[in-house]
Image (spheres, rainbow, N blue to C red):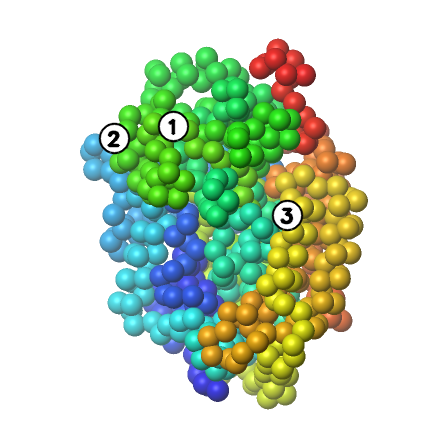
Amino acid sequence: MDDLEYDVVVIGAGGAGMRAAIEAKAQGARTAIVCKSLFGKAHTVMAEGGIAAALRNVWKEDSWQVHFRDTMRGGKLLNHWRMAQIHAQESPDRVLELEEWGAMFDRTPDGLILQRDFGGHRYARLAHVGDRTGLEMIRTLQDRAVELGIDVLMECTIQKLLTDDGRVAGCLGYLRQSGEMVLLRAKAIVLATGGIGKCWRVTSNSWEYTGDGMAMALEAGADLIDMEFVQFHPTGMVWPPSVRGILVTEGVRGDGGTLRNKDGERFMFWYIPDFFREETADTEAEADRWYDNKKDNRRTPDLLPRDEVARAINTEVKAGRGSAHGGVLLDIASRRSPEYIRSRLPSMYHQFKELADIDITKEPMEVGPTLHYMMGGIRVDPDTQATTVPGLFAAGEVAAGMHGSNRLGGNSLSDLLVFGRRAGLHAAQHANAQRAPGAVDPADVAATERRLAAPLERAGEDPYALHHDLQAVMQDLVGIIRTRTELDEAARQLGDLRRRYDRVGAKGGRRYNPGWNLALDLASMLTVAEAVARSAALREESRGGHTRGDFPNSDPEWGRKNVVARWRDGRIELTTEPLAQMPPDLAAIVGSEPKATEQTAVESTAPAGLGGHR
């Protein structure tokens, strides 16, 4: 077993992990990055549209206050107000810092960083590099990390956080290529492991997203909150089946694309919620006049927050107005020239051309909801990103609070930069205040080794079959629209899967063995899946990414509290706790939520007189 020691270990090499490691190194801490895959192959590269920041390069009227307001309203006021405030205030500096490190952003005619429209943002504020922004971010951060000489452990999966008297002492994992164990002793650990998308069948997430960080933090004593809030991005590919779920960037709609049902109707005008009506065009004619006169698309209901658009698409498909393959049509060809599309959306052009044999400069795309992002996760202090476990920090998608019940597009990349930096800074400060790492218990290490080796020593349940069944449960019973009956059935089936997991086996040895790797990942997936299903059953209202068909209205009482998950005696316990109260000056910026807002249920159809549907 490799036995290594650092001041700060960062688990995860996406945008948040790299930014945390860069900051920790800058503070003088001996720092290592651990990545489950290859260095630079992070899921951040799938964030295509841009980085949200009130740079004011396109709209001088923009400000951090407006960005803060948009974020809070997009999250249906369940966000931690302080995280949303810090994010809005610091995002511009983080984008400019990225530019100083070599990021090549698209430009305005006078040389400033260009910004595009995105759903839920009042002004065009997404700094972008075509539709490959996440890729450019990772390239820039990767170059910076290499320049600073930060140690990197590639293809290393961490499976256990080690503690000493309740504080972080290190972590234990294995190298995927050889199967050899790795012990990392550390004074502080930053979790930046991303989300949980591989628990669902249709997802934009890559294979690494198995909830490792959340499950390990929970077991180590950290709190999870808001686990019921998962985001279905409204536009993923639906055809052919082999690519179902692959992301279609919101930048298509930000650059003028419109959503239509099979009859060619722009159905999003039927689904504008009261909370957003004051800043959204009411009719197609009004939106087109704004678009034609101002060359600006920000008021179209096609750019409502993602939860609203995903529910509307789901409703159109359920009502029989979907496209040939079970989605809807996304059209940009009729609004923009082929040259513009190929210039602004090069990845989307090639993606559809190569994977679906569709030329998006000439014909519409078929799209539908795909599991995309986790708003819930590890509870952190908004200023330091510290968890409830001393020495453990978290940033990025693995951490909760910033986005409330629904994340606005583009806020993810600025979230990674803002809170990745803060996590690295405070992890280094914590480490520098410690004389030595905590003591690692050899018995704990030995027990973890035995647990990891167990699947190799039995010929039991097939991990691939178990994963298939887990995805079916989450896709069918814990999807866009939820009910008590289905959630209770999901909890029952997850319990059955947990019992089956105790018999899971993997053929072969430790050297690169995908079956064994999946068997180990399944432990984390089953834990976080249970937390999602049970939290969703507890929250009896509809809000943001959580829609209950049996409780279609938002409830002001539920809007004032989080659902909290804790690990007690080997099982998940749930409770509710009040939100942090927003200061009056910030509350005045946001405004108040309507007393009762009904979210679009599966059975809903277009209002009479709009499209002729009843």
**Would you say 598 lies left or right of 193 here?**
right
Q: Secondary structure at mark 1?
A: loop
Locate residue 413, reporting x and y percent. 42, 49
Q: Which residue is mark 1?
A: 363
Locate residue 115, reporting x and y percent. 33, 36
Q: Residues within 10 Å of mark 1 (few under 14, many from 20)?
A: some
**Would you say 119 lies left or right of 359 here?**
right
Do we see residue 531 in this rendering? yes
Q: Secondary structure at mark 3?
A: helix
Outermost residue to the left: 110
Rendered residue at 70%/47% (across/down): 477
Q: Secondary structure at mark 2?
A: helix
Task: Locate the C terminus and report the quarter of the image it occupies.
Answer: top right
Determine the CA span between mark 1 and mark 3.
30 Å
Rendered residue at 38%/19% (across/down): 291
Q: Earlier in the sequence, mark 1 or mark 2?
A: 2
Do we see residue 19 in this rendering? no
Q: Do the numbered discs 3 and 2 sit on residues whose CB atoms are within 8 Å?
A: no
Count the marks.
Answer: 3
Q: Residues within 10 Å of mark 2 (few under 14, many from 20)?
A: few
Q: Residues within 10 Å of mark 3 (few under 14, many from 20)?
A: some
Locate residue 548, reporting x and y percent. 71, 39
Q: Amino acid at mark 3?
A: Gln
Task: Give residue 339's mark.
Answer: 2
Q: Earlier in the sequence, mark 1 or mark 3?
A: 1
Q: Is residue 256 above or below residue 147?
A: above
Q: Indicate the quadrant where residue 273 lies.
A: top right
Q: Amino acid at mark 2?
A: Glu
Q: Indicate the quadrant where residue 609 lies.
A: top right
Q: Which residue is mark 3?
A: 475
Q: Earlier in the sequence, mark 3 or mark 2?
A: 2
